[in-house]
């Protein structure tokens, strides 16, 4: 097909597993990377509930070398 000739494959994004803080409230989807928190046990910035540690697979930041 002529319209697909110039089409490039999308660049694959490198992902890593990161430690994150997940909001403990069932009504909130808040989370943040552990390395970006200023507290040992932060509260959710959206609903002020307690947060628990978890793991997520996320794309690396452009300045990040890897875990």
Image: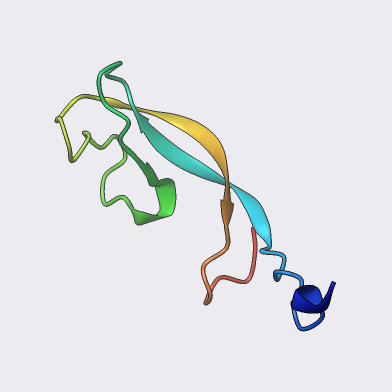
- Percent across and percent down for residue 61 are 51, 68
Q: Nearer the viewer, residue 12 or 50?
A: 12
Q: Is residue 56 visible?
A: yes
**Eyeballing the image, is 64 above or below 44?**
below
Which quarter of the rendering shows the N terminus? bottom right
The type of colouring in the image is rainbow
Looking at the image, residue 26 sits to the left or right of residue 2; the answer is left
Q: Residue at x 52, y 77 (%)?
A: 63
Q: Residue at x 25, y 19 (%)?
A: 27
Occupied quadrant, residue 29: top left
Q: Residue at x 63, y 71 (%)?
A: 65
Q: Is residue 8 visible?
A: no
- Percent across and percent down for residue 8 are 75, 77
Q: Nearer the viewer, residue 45 or 29?
A: 29
Occupied quadrant, residue 10: bottom right
Looking at the image, residue 59 sits to the left or right of residue 51; the answer is right
- Percent across and percent down for residue 45 are 18, 41
Looking at the image, residue 45 sits to the left or right of residue 32; the answer is left
**Eyeballing the image, is 61 above or below 16?**
below
Looking at the image, residue 42 sits to the left or right of residue 22; the answer is left
- Percent across and percent down for residue 57 are 60, 44
Q: How many marks?
A: 0
Q: Residue at x 76, y 71 (%)?
A: 9
**Eyeballing the image, is 5 above or below 16?**
below
**Eyeballing the image, is 64 above or below 14?**
below
Q: Nearer the viewer, residue 7 or 55?
A: 7
Residue furthest out toward the top:
26
Which quarter of the rendering shows the C terminus? bottom right
Residue furthest out toward the bottom:
6
């Amino acid at each position: 097909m002529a319209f697909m000739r110039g089409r490039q494959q999308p660049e694959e994004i490198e992902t890593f597993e990161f430690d994150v803080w997940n909001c403990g409230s069932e009504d909130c989807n808040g989370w943040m990377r552990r390395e970006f928190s200023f507290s040992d046990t932060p509260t959710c910035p959206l609903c002020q509930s307690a947060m628990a540690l978890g793991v997520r697979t996320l794309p690396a930041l452009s300045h990040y070398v890897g875990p």
